[in-house]
Image: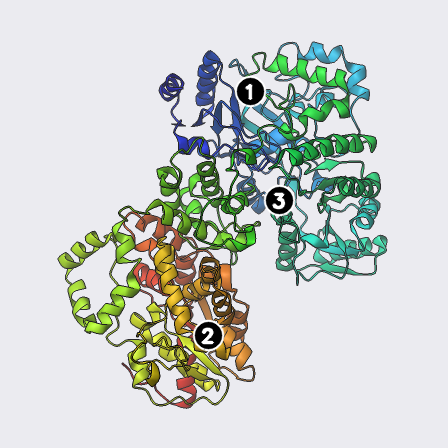
């Protein structure tokens, strides 16, 4: 392997990675399979690809081409050298609006092509749900389709010409009329005309096998079309000319409800004569509560187009009448349509979990039958599932007869794998009986190639083998796929995981306490690899900055999987590969909500750091910022805040302090408040509220850095009639609700003075033993609050998220943790629930800023939106992550990534805000990042409302 790596490095200009980390990142795609490659090459151009093929041919090493790695049948994995086209060969080389064509490289992500074509009223027709990260090369390899195939066909229908390198280095230009055919292919077809005319099912989604029938003379002898769907087994694609279609000026979406998916399936074929753009189906099991769909057990999403909105709407109404349904909804607003389509697109991830939380897996993801037979097929399919004791929820392209489904196979035990095989064999027979194709979109790969003789017969499969030998006589390209396939029950990715659960600190309640299951949540759909986000989405900010797989949520999950497997990454929790990949994880928690399967990389990172540094010296930043609450409490006790601020203003001393503390030199050290929030509280006038009592949490940031936020919150909460108290500061056997200065006389001799803390800084740096101790102390202090059942208002979103999410998972053995988590409310939530009659002051100004990433991921911002609207604050806050993310952006070596994250959404939104706009940033990190990078001071919503109250009443809060 060393000789191979050296020769490749000498032969190509692109990157060559034969290290454990590079290989671990591509052991899997989005399938059930895992194969360990020798190395990864990111070629810069076709010459690099040719050089790789030459070196690998000399060594007899297989080559596998890989795009986004979202293939779900195993065809994007391999044991030789993997070519990663996403790094360099990802360009849009030419766009010809007049000719409706584009010239693309294989690593180009579909959304980039769509964005470039859109201004010309054009698009690439096929649009898989992974459009934000799948590549054109991967789409051509799999002959991908997507939801609009009833109107615009498959990828093969939209390919004009290809540039291909064969394994022996021949450069071909496949096209029509035998253009680019390898020697012998024309003669092979001439001798098998009868078989090619009669041996292939006639249906719109027949993807399985090689499309040799595209070489028939009556079909134009189209070598490019025949190459599509060959899964990288015939040649390596280096460039493609693809066709573009005109986009309707207006669209309408009809949502039709049915009793179940069989009824929806039977109706789908009858809608095709009306020329819809899409006919998609899904059942209730995959639809989240409150999705806004009409009542029913299953739905068809039927899109119509037109030159005008009225024309599109009229066509949608015509479809509704033809569908003969009781309930229907026609949506013309583009934003509302996008919301509905997100439900459908997320099904690829949602389907991986059954309603009871158990896992479901691909393997039979996309069989297709003639659309008119879909209803009958689904009934037989359901019966087969029941006969094998399996469950799955079908969804997909009902108009094309193509069904996606993930099934709760047991792929961990011998008995379960045996059942997987028997079911697969029987389902292949069932699909064939209905005149269908084993693959209707994503290719055969390892999941189905073994069963192709059941669909085509042995003679046609031997014809496939002969065609493969003409293109690739040495069987160098992606061997084990399509012909001479690997068994469907070999190379399963779960087989390498430890047989026994791993000893971990968090409880992982959603995964049965099993860290293996938590890591296995990642099924590779790679929504985290999206190059940009719109709306409130956050995941995955570090990938969007670096573009590197190891900095995506999926890449990190893959490395953790390999760490547990112990084959490639052999040093377990001490792994430097995993540590380095997690180093740029911002712990933004975006994946917790944005990942369709709920991967929680922030928790996995904390778990890893806990084990990685156990008994070892930690980075300086873990002490300086991970123990921030301790340092700040010490400063408050010694009353040295002003002194420290003065010292921090002396640049040489500040530079020395930052160097010792592992803090980025580019950062300014935030100023400490001269008087803490609780010090102000002790000296204020008595509480004025007469309504519900609430406990205001004095988080570290509010307490020591921005007490103005706490003072403003008290002002607003009391104006709303609420009685505000602070948590107790003494642990006693029988305490009372405290106000920050409570003393229980009978307990003074035994009680210890302490402060509540959410443990956030300890969690983010993986100091979990310390976090558990701090949180147990907090629960002790909060006992009287919990007994009284009072709401706990937390102003800092990251602290609220830690209490609501991390606390019960870390102290899963303490029932008080769940009780405190349930009591935590955000500022807006407490006003909405406990002061519903209160009317906020009218601010009547536009807003800009950012929803805190932890609020988006864990807490939700529905109450905040309603509160802002009631106060006349108009407009939406941006999504993404500010990039500071607690300690992350302050740590040495993170500044550039941190700033790039802020430049994605937050900073542009603030710069573009018109004069008079209120800049809202509820999180201390967001405010700090904004101020340090732009000089603009963001404010907490409580501060904005308190200021408006002062204008309304003429009162002014005394300054500290």
Give the CA distance from mark 3 to mark 1. 27 Å
Residue 851 x/y as whole percent: 46, 63
Give the CA distance from mark 2 to mark 3. 41 Å
Q: Decide: is 341 above or below 364.
A: below
**Chain-order first, disc 3 or disc 1:** 3
Residue located at (71% from left, 15% from top): 462
Q: Is residue 620 left or right of residue 428?
A: left
The dot on residue 477 is 1
Answer with the quarter of the image where residue 163 lies: top right
Query: Which secondary structure lies at badge 1?
Result: loop
Choose mark 2 or mark 3, whichever is in front. 2
Q: Decide: is 623 above or below 493.
A: below
Residue 794 x/y as whole percent: 43, 71
Choose mark 2 or mark 1, whichever is in front. 2
Residue located at (76% from left, 47% from top): 276
Q: Decide: is 437 above or below 321.
A: above
Q: Is residue 856 visible?
A: no
**Chain-order first, disc 2 or disc 1:** 1
Quarter holding the C terminus is: bottom left
Q: Residues within 10 Å of mark 2 (few under 14, many from 20)?
A: many
Give the CA distance from mark 2 to mark 1. 61 Å
Residue located at (76% from left, 26% from top): 455
**Front in this rendered view, residue 735 or 36:** 735
Residue placed under numbered mark 2 in the picture: 792
Residue placed under numbered mark 3 in the picture: 129
């Amino acid at each position: 392997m060393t000789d191979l790596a050296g020769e490749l490095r000498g032969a190509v200009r692109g990157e060559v990675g034969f290290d454990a980390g590079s290989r671990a990142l591509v052991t899997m795609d989005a399938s059930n399979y895992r194969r360990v490659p020798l190395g990864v090459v990111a070629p810069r151009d076709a010459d690099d690809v040719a050089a790789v093929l030459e070196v690998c041919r000399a060594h007899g090493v297989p080559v596998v081409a890989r795009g986004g790695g979202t293939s779900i049948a195993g065809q994007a994995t391999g044991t030789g050298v993997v070519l990663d086209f996403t790094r360099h060969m990802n360009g849009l080389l030419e766009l010809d609006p007049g000719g409706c064509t584009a010239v693309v490289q294989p690593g180009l992500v579909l959304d980039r092509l769509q964005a470039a074509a859109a201004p010309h009223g054009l698009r690439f027709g096929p649009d898989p749900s992974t459009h934000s990260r799948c590549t054109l090369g991967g789409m051509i390899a799999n002959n991908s389709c997507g939801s609009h195939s009833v109107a615009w066909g498959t990828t093969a229908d939209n390919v004009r010409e290809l540039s291909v390198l064969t394994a022996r280095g021949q450069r071909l230009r496949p096209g029509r009329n035998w253009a680019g055919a390898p020697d012998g292919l024309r003669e092979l077809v001439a001798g098998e005309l009868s078989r090619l005319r009669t041996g292939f099912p006639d249906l719109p989604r027949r993807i399985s096998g090689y499309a040799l029938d595209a070489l028939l003379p009556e079909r134009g002898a189209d070598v490019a079309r025949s190459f599509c769907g060959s899964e990288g087994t015939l040649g390596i694609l280096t460039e493609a000319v693809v066709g573009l279609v005109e986009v309707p000026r207006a669209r309408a979406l009809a949502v039709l409800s049915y009793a179940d998916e069989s009824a929806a399936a039977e109706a789908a074929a009858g809608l095709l004569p009306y020329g819809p753009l899409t006919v998609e189906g899904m059942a209730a099991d995959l639809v989240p509560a409150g999705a806004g769909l009409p009542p029913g057990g299953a739905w068809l999403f039927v899109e119509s187009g037109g030159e005008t909105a009225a024309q599109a709407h009229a066509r949608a109404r015509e479809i509704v009448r033809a569908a003969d349904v009781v309930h229907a909804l026609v949506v013309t607003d583009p934003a509302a349509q996008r919301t509905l389509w997100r439900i459908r697109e997320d099904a690829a991830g949602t389907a991986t979990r059954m309603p009871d939380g158990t896992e479901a897996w691909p393997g039979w993801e996309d069989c297709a039958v003639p659309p008119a037979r879909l209803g009958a097929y689904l009934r037989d399919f359901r019966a087969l599932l029941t006969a094998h004791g399996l469950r799955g929820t079908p969804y997909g392209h009902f108009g094309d007869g193509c069904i996606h489904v993930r099934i709760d196979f047991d792929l961990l035990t011998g008995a379960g794998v045996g059942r997987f095989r028997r079911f697969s064999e029987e389902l292949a027979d069932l699909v064939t009986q209905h005149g269908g194709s084993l693959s209707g979109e994503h290719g055969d790969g390892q999941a189905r190639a073994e069963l192709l003789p059941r669909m085509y017969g042995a003679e046609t499969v031997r014809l496939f083998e002969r065609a493969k030998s003409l293109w690739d006589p040495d069987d160098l390209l992606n061997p084990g796929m399509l012909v001479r396939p690997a068994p469907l029950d070999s190379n399963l990715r779960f087989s390498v995981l430890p047989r026994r659960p791993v000893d971990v600190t968090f409880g992982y309640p959603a995964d049965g306490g099993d860290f293996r299951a938590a890591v296995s949540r990642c099924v590779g759909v790679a929504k985290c690899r999206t190059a940009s986000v719109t709306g409130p989405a956050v995941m995955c900010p570090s990938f969007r900055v670096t573009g590197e797989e190891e900095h995506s949520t999926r890449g990190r999950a893959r490395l953790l999987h390999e760490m547990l497997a112990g084959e490639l990454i052999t040093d377990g929790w001490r792994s430097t590969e995993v540590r380095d990949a997690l180093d740029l994880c911002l712990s933004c928690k975006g994946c917790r909500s944005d990942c369709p399967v709920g991967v929680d990389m922030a928790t996995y990172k904390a778990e890893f750091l806990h084990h990685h540094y156990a008994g070892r010296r930690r980075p300086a930043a873990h002490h300086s910022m991970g123990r921030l609450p301790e340092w700040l409490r010490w400063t408050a006790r010694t009353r040295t805040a002003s002194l420290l601020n003065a010292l921090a203003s002396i640049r040489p001393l500040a530079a020395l302090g930052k160097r010792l503390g592992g803090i980025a030199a580019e950062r300014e050290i935030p100023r400490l408040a001269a008087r803490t929030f609780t010090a102000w509280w002790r000296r204020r006038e008595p509480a004025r509220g007469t309504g519900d009592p609430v406990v205001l949490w004095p988080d570290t940031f509010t307490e020591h850095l921005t007490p103005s936020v706490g003072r403003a919150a008290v002002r607003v909460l009391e104006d709303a009639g609420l009685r505000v108290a602070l948590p107790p500061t003494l642990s006693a056997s029988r305490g009372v609700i405290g106000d920050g200065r409570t003393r229980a006389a009978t307990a003074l001799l035994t009680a210890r003075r302490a402060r509540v803390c959410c443990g956030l800084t300890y969690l983010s740096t993986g100091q979990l033993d310390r976090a558990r101790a701090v949180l147990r102390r907090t629960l002790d202090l909060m006992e009287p609050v919990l007994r009284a059942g009072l709401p706990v208002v937390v102003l800092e979103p990251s602290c609220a998220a830690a209490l609501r999410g991390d606390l019960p998972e870390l102290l899963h053995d303490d029932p008080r943790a769940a009780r405190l988590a349930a009591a935590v409310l955000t500022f807006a939530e407490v006003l909405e629930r406990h002061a519903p009659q209160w009317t906020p002051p009218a601010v009547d100004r536009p807003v800009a800023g950012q929803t805190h990433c932890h609020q988006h991921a864990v807490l939700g911002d529905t109450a905040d939106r309603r509160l802002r609207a009631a106060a006349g604050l108009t407009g939406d806050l941006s999504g993404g992550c500010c990039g500071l993310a607690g300690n992350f952006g302050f740590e040495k070596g993170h500044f550039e990534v941190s700033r790039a994250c802020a430049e994605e959404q937050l900073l542009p939104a603030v710069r573009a805000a018109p004069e008079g706009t209120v800049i809202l940033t509820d999180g201390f990190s967001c405010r700090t990042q904004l101020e340090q990078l732009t000089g603009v001071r963001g404010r907490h919503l409580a501060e904005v409302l308190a200021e408006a109250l002062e204008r309304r009443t003429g009162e002014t809060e005394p300054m500290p």
